[in-house]
Image (cartoon, helix red, strand yellow):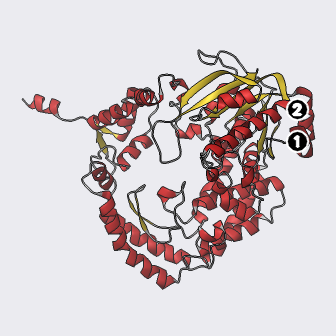
Amino acid sequence: MELQKINDMPELLSIKEASQWATEYLNKNVTTSNIAYLIQYGRIRKIGNNGSTQVLKDDLVKYYKDQKKSRQEEWKEQLGEDLNWALSFEQYKEAETTKHVHRLHPYKGKFIPQLVEYFLDDHTDKFKKEVYFKPGDIVLDPFSGSGTTMVQACELGIHAVGVDVSAFNTMIGNCKVEKYNLADVQSEIIRISKALNKFIADSNAVEFEENLLQKLNVFNNKYFPVPEYKYKVKRKEIDEKTYGAEKEAEFLPIYNELVKKYKIKLRQEKEDTFLDKWYSQHIREEIEFVYNEIKKIENPKTKQIISLILSRTIRSCRATTHADLATLLEPVTTTYYCSKHGKICKPLFSIMKWWSTYSKDTVKRLGQFDKLRKNTFHTCLTGDSRNIDIIEQMNRVNPAFAELIEKQKIKGIFSSPPYVGLIDYHEQHAYAYDLFGFKRHDELEIGPLYKGRGREAKQSYIEGIIAVLNNTKKFLVDDYDIFLVANDKYNMYPTIAENAGMKIVNQYKRPVLNRTEKDKGAYAEIIFHLKEK
């Protein structure tokens, strides 16, 4: 009888045992951090405390069965049986899809490096039956964006040219593939950080934030205990919207009292620019302080990469909620209920935390990439791919590379053109344009969000992509290979290929699993393989 009772008891696993079990069950690496995440965000129950946390094996089985319930099957039902799941790269964790320099700066709409590598490397499989690029070849990305194609080409020993109409995008791409004196970069970061610390110490914002954090911790521990609160929300035992709003209103007087006590200025006098509107007064002053320190740097490469660190920092310091960071709504200057973290959160009052985090992260990532890169040419040019003379422009910045392009010609293209009516590429980095004083060329973007998706916008998009292909193929070898990644829901690319004197020889429809936006629904894109007609 006692034995029967024991057998009926649910099986408990430590976090380490749970990670081992899940790794075996899923046939892919599941870390203890992954299990801890499931507990923290209420996906599975937490059993025990004080360093002896356990989980129920039954909870794990149910969670992973629901996950496995095949997203593949569901997506194929919605998107069609021609969905090539092998190109989902679902076996890769986020740390691998954002490896080394790929995460030096946020960028909407970038493809993952594994996709680029798949078509650029020398492997073949049942889908990719030929090798299209080899070491020593040159690849072109006429919509370079954040420079993913250039970076992967650099890993593979392939020369790469990028072109982008956005000066800031060009800066991102070139920062990723540049070689640095890391000792100099580190030394300048230390100097600036010391100066920033001294600047902050002279402000009452430090004491204000310390007091605010203390009161927030007490409040959140009482009303939003981890992980019990999220677990109850997940199971609809708590109405998150109502409860969150109640507690937000309850904490607000405490916050307002502290703001008054320390004389904190939450908004700037004017809202003429992005930096004026989306940053508190104190943060704005810190940004200017650091930027002025960066201007003192003598080494131009060091100055550029540290400028990129500052840009990444200030993007994370905008006056917005954590949930709305990617899609800004209205500036937030008070404490608020945060659905992402399941507690009352606060606006930022200093850039120091993110500056320090991103400085360390950048140096680490540059070091990682330095061990992988090959000794090849990689340059992104600022210009309009519809009419740029690649050799002429390259000759101004890298004559040796220009000579190689002229002599050898470019083997092909791997690129992701803009999707019609989806993103305003200049506006997503408006803060950087304001700070660095780059000239904006929004009017030269192909298919921007602000032009919409009407008939005229689609026609303009088609004409724009055709012009890019017609211009760039002048620099390609005769037997070129062009790969364009597009979500062609309006069926524009057959027309584009035809009018560019090309034919679509193959297309690969892949599920996009690693989207950065809130929409996690079924989504696919097509990689079009084009050749001369």
Left or right, 481 with respect to 65, comes to: right
Where residue 518 appears, as percent x and y from the top left, is 48, 48
Where residue 522 appears, as percent x and y from the top left, is 46, 36
Between 84 and 350, which is closer to the camera in this rendering? 84
User: In terms of image quadrants, where is residue 405?
Assistant: top right
User: In terms of image quadrants, where is residue 186?
Assistant: bottom right
Q: Between marks 2 and 1, how big is the CA–CA gap? A: 9 Å
Query: Which of the marked residues, 2 or 1, is nearer the chain's N terminus?
Result: 1
User: In terms of image quadrants, where is residue 112?
Assistant: top right
Where residue 466 appears, as percent x and y from the top left, is 75, 35
Where is 81 relative to 268, above or below? above
Callout 1: 10 Å neighbours few (<14), some, many (20+)?
some
Q: Are marks 2 and 1 in contact (CB under 8 Å)?
A: yes
Between 213 and 166, which is closer to the camera in this rendering? 166
For the residue labelled by badge 2, is the local secondary structure a helix, a strand or a loop? helix
Q: Could you say which disc has been placed on residue 394 in the image?
A: 1
Residue 224 showing in the rendered view: no
Q: Residue at x 30, y 50 (%)?
A: 231
